[in-house]
Image: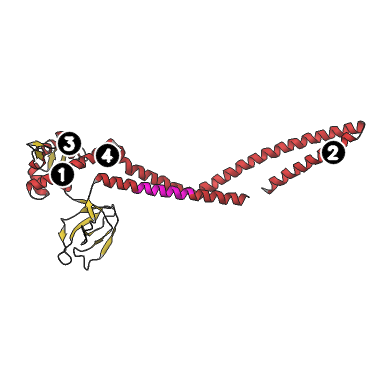
């Protein structure tokens, strides 16, 4: 700072003074001139050593300034850096199913399982309870081999007497239910697969009654949120006859009624697709990560300029 500049100036002035005296001494004849020159050269050497020391100290000061700036930046941006690290960890976790063989198998299994369950429901012409009886009779668990054997014979997913799915694909579909990999699934776990899930296609309100008129808003649902149907869709006979479904939001567990399609033909709910849902979560996580990284970069640039200004 100021002391550094003053030292540099003093050394420069001393150096100029000694050089002037050297010139004067050279003009003086005799032994006195020789002695004066020797003293001045000695003094000149000391000045040069002092100059070197000032240069060394200047370097140290610059290093200290850089460390000081870095420390200030670290203190002032620690919270933002930690948030960025958290968002990176979340994005990595969300994207994991897309990057692992197990995750990709899960998406493939869902593609197999959904039409199989639809075919099963169509075959028994009833709900999940009848589907269970068709596969497992009165047992409390369903082995994989029995599932594969029974499903392979469903005419709804067969052509010319041949099942459209290989036994390996049927086993993959079964593993979608058998999350604990026990080789069999209990009744309740199987029946849970029939609960329908939807993705929010357009912003829509969840209300506390089937009838739109007079209902209170539970909360607004955002695009790409996932909800699970708790009942079969029903019509609101007291209003415009809109088809509505009671559902639970995965995000916070809130329950209420949601309109499937508006009176102008707007679809508020779309069939849940696990791959698309994962893709949307990854997109959202990456957007938040990039946004936070940009905010941190701007904060760092601003702080560096402030620190440079305060050092000037």
Between the residue at mark 4 and the residue at mark 2, the CA separation in whole angstroms equals 85 Å
> Is residue 236 positioned above or below 300 on the image?
below
Quick check: marks 3 and 1 in contact, CB under 8 Å?
Answer: no
The residue stretch that appears in magenta? 284-297
Mark 2 and mark 4 in contact (Cβ < 8 Å)? no
Under circle 3, the secondary element is helix
Q: Where is residue 7 in the image (x, y as percent from the top left)?
A: 72, 44
Q: Name the residue under label 2.
A: 21
Q: Residue at x 27, y 39 (%)?
A: 103
Determine the residue positioned at 71% across, 36% down.
52
- Residue farthest to the right, as pictured: 30
Along the viewing direction, whichever of 155 and 33 lies nearer the viewer: 155
Name the residue that disc number 1 marks. Answer: 115
- Estimate the spatial distance between the alpha carbons at disc 1 and disc 2, rounded to whole Å: 102 Å
In this figure, which residue is indicated by the disc labeled 4? 103
- For the point 87% across and 35% down, the residue is 25
The residues tagged by marks 3 and 1 sit, at their Cα atoms, a distance apart of: 12 Å
User: Regarding mark 2 in the picture, which secondary structure is present there?
Assistant: helix
Q: Which residue is drawn at 35% across and 47% down?
A: 285
Give the alpha-carbon distance from disc 4 to disc 3, as whole Å. Answer: 16 Å
Is 234 placed above or below 98 here? below
Residue furthest to the bottom:
214
Mark 1 touching mark 2, by CB under 8 A?
A: no
Q: Which of 81 and 113 is in front in this view?
A: 113
The disc placed on residue 169 is 3
């Amino acid at each position: 700072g100021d002391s550094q500049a003053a030292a540099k100036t003093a050394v420069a002035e001393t150096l100029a003074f000694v050089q002037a005296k050297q010139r004067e001494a050279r003009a003086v004849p005799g032994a006195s001139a020789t002695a004066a020159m020797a003293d001045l050269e000695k003094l000149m050497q000391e000045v040069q050593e002092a100059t070197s020391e000032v240069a060394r100290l200047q370097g140290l000061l610059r290093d200290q300034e850089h460390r000081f700036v870095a420390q200030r930046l670290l203190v002032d941006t620690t919270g933002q850096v930690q948030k960025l690290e958290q968002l990176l960890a979340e994005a990595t976790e969300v994207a994991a199913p897309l990057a692992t063989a197990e995750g990709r198998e899960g998406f493939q299994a869902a593609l197999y399982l959904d039409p199989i369950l639809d075919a099963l429901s169509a075959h028994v012409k009833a709900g999940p309870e009848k589907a269970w009886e068709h596969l497992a009779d009165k047992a409390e668990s369903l082995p994989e081999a029995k599932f594969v054997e029974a499903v392979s014979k469903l005419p709804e997913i067969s052509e010319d007497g041949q099942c459209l799915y290989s036994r390996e694909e049927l086993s993959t579909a079964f593993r979608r239910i058998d999350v604990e990999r026990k080789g069999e699934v209990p009744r309740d776990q199987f029946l849970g697969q029939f609960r329908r899930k939807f993705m929010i296609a357009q912003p829509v309100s969840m209300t506390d009654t089937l009838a739109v008129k007079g209902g209170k808003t539970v909360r607004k649902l955002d695009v790409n949120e996932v909800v699970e149907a708790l009942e079969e869709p029903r019509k609101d006979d007291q209003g415009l006859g809109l088809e509505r479904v009671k559902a639970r939001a995965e995000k916070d567990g809130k329950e209420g009624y949601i309109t499937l399609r508006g009176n102008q033909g707007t679809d508020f709910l779309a069939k849940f697709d696990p791959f698309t849902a994962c893709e949307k979560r990854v997109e959202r996580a990456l957007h938040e990560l990039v946004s936070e990284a940009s905010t941190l970069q701007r904060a760092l640039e601003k702080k560096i300029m402030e620190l440079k200004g305060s050092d000037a």
